[in-house]
Amino acid sequence: MEEGKLFKQLRQARGFTLAHLSDDLNSRSFISKFETGASNISLHRLEHLLGKINVSFEEFLYLRALDQGTAHFEHVLYTPMYLTSVFIEQLDRVLAINKDAYSSAESMQRGIRQITALKKEIADKQDSTFILLYADSIQHTFKVNLEANVAQTQTEAQTQREHFFETYRIRTRPVVSYLLKVDDWGVYEVLLFRYFQFLFPIDTSHRLLKTAISRTQKESGLAVMREVQLDLLFSTFSTFINFRHFEWAKEALDLAEEILFDQGDLLNSANLLCYQGWYWYILGDIEKGIQKFDQGLSVFRILKQPKQVSLWEMMLKSVKKNALDPNRYLVFR
């Protein structure tokens, strides 16, 4: 739906006439031309008109996206959200493929084909360099995990994983350079860090995490920034613990606990218990690790969240394998 047509629909639904809205900034004739698509409108004039019918600019953009079928990005964060961002729309599509790829070898093969098609589609889009690089890393991850399912020696599998990280730590240098160059991070930069951090050198991820968290706190009025705080901490924890940086892993969990204190966020609090179980199990306190996992799983069961129960039961199996052999992990995003 065009902006003018949507505005007319909202105006009429609220009982406003053109005469009600016309003033020195927007004449009756101009509003009529805007609604019929005969005239373009500036951001300032549109914001002024929306204020007169009591519709926020953000709501207007959301309703426009809803009509276009792109109003829900369900894979970027736990809570579906929407922002007027081509990058986030493309990222969500990559993550949707990634989410469905790990049930079987066939699904990973399908994921490789889907990523290949998506890369062709977005290759010519403006500023698509970083999202193409991320899609490439996900596709490479599928291939690494498929090859890991084929009979390999432990040395061969480890060499393959090391090569993967060496390759992408070089290829993601432009992403690191960009993030270091930008002083005032917004949603784009924070999400860029969140989804690339596992490919960075570990000390770089640790250093940039502080910047990312400070920016989410600065813009905490945006729901996406509040949600991404914990996602950042949990994802960097996963990176730190897999590479056995225990102090940094503990820092991430402690900050997550501080953010969650007295917030009533039961699902993320249960997630935190499971992450704490992961930490203690890998650290060597198996009893405490299992206790934390059991506490988190109990909360999920009480809240009737079977998908989360299944996810963490599967994760616990991987944690147990990883505790015995630090090289026994799937390449993770």
Image: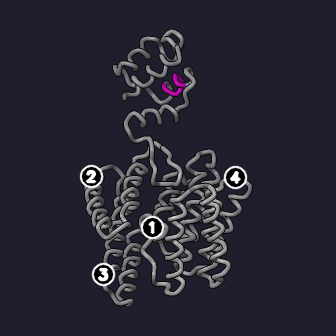
- CB under 8 Å between discs 2 and 3: no
Report the amino acid beneath label 3.
Val
* Label 2 environment density (alpha carbons within 10 Å; few <14, some 14–19, many ≥20): few
The residue where tag 2 is placed is 121
User: What distance separates the C-alpha of mark 2 from that of mark 4?
Assistant: 42 Å
Residue drawn at x 35%, y 54% is: 128
Q: Nearer the viewer, mark 2 or mark 3?
A: 3
The residue where tag 3 is placed is 150
* Label 4 environment density (alpha carbons within 10 Å; few <14, some 14–19, many ≥20): few
- CB under 8 Å between discs 3 and 1: no
* Secondary-structure class at tag 1: loop
Report the amino acid beneath label 1.
Arg
Q: Nearer the viewer, mark 1 or mark 4?
A: 4
Q: Nearer the viewer, mark 1 or mark 2?
A: 1
* Secondary-structure class at tag 4: loop
- CB under 8 Å between discs 1 and 2: no
Q: Position of residue 91 (x, y in %)?
A: 41, 54
Who comes first in sequence, dot 2 or dot 4? 2
- CB under 8 Å between discs 2 and 4: no
The residue where tag 4 is placed is 264
The N terminus, quarter of image: top left
Q: Nearer the viewer, residue 127 or 289?
A: 289
Q: Position of residue 52 (x, y in %)?
A: 56, 20
Report the amino acid beneath label 4.
Gly
* Secondary-structure class at tag 3: loop
Report the amino acid beneath label 2.
Glu
* Secondary-structure class at tag 2: helix
The residue where tag 1 is placed is 333
| Circle number at residue 171 | none
Who comes first in sequence, dot 1 or dot 2? 2
Start and end of the magenta stretch? 46-50
Left or right side of 313 for 250: right
